[in-house]
Image (spheres, rainbow, N blue to C red):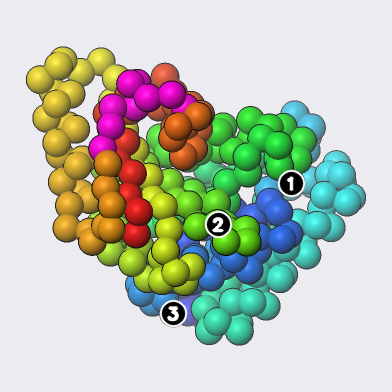
Amino acid sequence: MSDAVERFIKQQYKVVLGLGHPKRVEGLMRIASVFARRQKGRIVAVSVVTVPEGVDLEEGAEYADPEALQQAEEMVQRAQDFGAELGIAVDPLVEFAYDIPTGISEVCERYQAEMVLLGFSPPEDASGDAEVPARITEEVACMAGPSLAIVALPEGDERARMLIPVTDALDPRVIRDLTKIVAIFGGADITFIGLVEKGLSEEEFEARSAELRAKIEGVEFEEIECVDLDAREASHCLFGAEARQMSGETHDAAFILRARV
C-alpha cells in the first residue's frame, strides 16, 4: 500500500462496528453502511476476543479460546464480504483485549473513529456476562471522541430500537443520518439520553441540558416524549438499565427523549 493510499484511509470518516453475535452481522452492517456511505468513509468491523489478564496481547491468539477466535474471524470476514456487496470499504479486525469495553475503546482510539455502532443484547440473550452491553456503553459513551449509537435489531414485526447518548461528541451528521437508517426498517423507536458532567451547579446543569437538547432539534419525529431519567422506572424505558449505567461515575443523565420515527 502506497503512502498516499495510507494517508487517504487515515483521513477517511471511520465507523467502528462492534460484532459479537453472528446472526446480527448483516443487520448491523446495513446500519453502519448508512453512516459510512454518507461521509464517503469506511467501516472497521471489529470483534473483541478476551484473553487472561497479564498475557502479551500481541500473542493473544495463543491464549484465546479457539472457538471464540474462530467465531470472531468468521464474523469480521462476513462483514467484509457483505461490505463488498454494499459497496462499502470494510477493514476486518480481531482485537485481543483483557475485556470487551477496553478492546472497543482501544480500536476507536487507534483508528481515530468518528462513530461507534454497537448491537444491544438484552440480559436473557447475552452470552457469558449479562452486563457486557452496559459496561461497553458506559465506557464508550464517556470517551471524548466518537459518537455512539446502540441498536436493537427488530425481530418479526418488532420495530428497530436505537439508543443515542447525547454528548459533546455527538456529531450532528449522525442525527441527520437517522432518517435513512429508519427507512431501512420502515420505522424505529429512538431514545436520546442527555449526558451531563457530574458536579455542576443547578444553573450549569440546566444550561448544559438545554445545550444538548439543541443538538437534536429539527429532526422529524412522528411522536416525541421527553422525561427526566430519574423520574421513570427502568422497565418503562428502552435500554433503561444501560442508560443508568452509562451515566456512571462521571455523568448525570439530564433527560430522555423518546421518539417514534
- Amino acid tagged 1: Val
Q: Which residues are magenta?
A: 226-234
Out of 168 and 93, give the one closest to the viewer: 168
Q: CA distance from mark 1 to mark 3?
A: 32 Å
Residue beneath disc 3: 4
Q: Is residue 29 above or below residue 107?
A: below
Tell me whether circle 2 and circle 3 mark residues in contact (CB < 8 Å).
Answer: no
Residue 36 among those drawn in magenta: no
Q: Nearer the viewer, mark 1 or mark 3?
A: 1
Q: Is residue 59 above or below residue 159?
A: above
Task: Classify mark 2: residues with Cα within 10 Å, few (<14), some (14-19) or many (20+).
Answer: few
- Amino acid tagged 3: Ala
**Could you tell me which quadrant the N terminus lies in?**
bottom right
Say the numbered circle drawn on residue 158.
2
- Can I make out residue 9 in this image? yes
Secondary structure found at label 1: strand
Secondary structure found at label 2: loop
Q: CA distance from mark 2 to mark 3?
A: 46 Å
Residue beneath disc 1: 49
Secondary structure found at label 3: helix
Say the numbered circle drawn on residue 182.
none
- Amino acid tagged 2: Glu
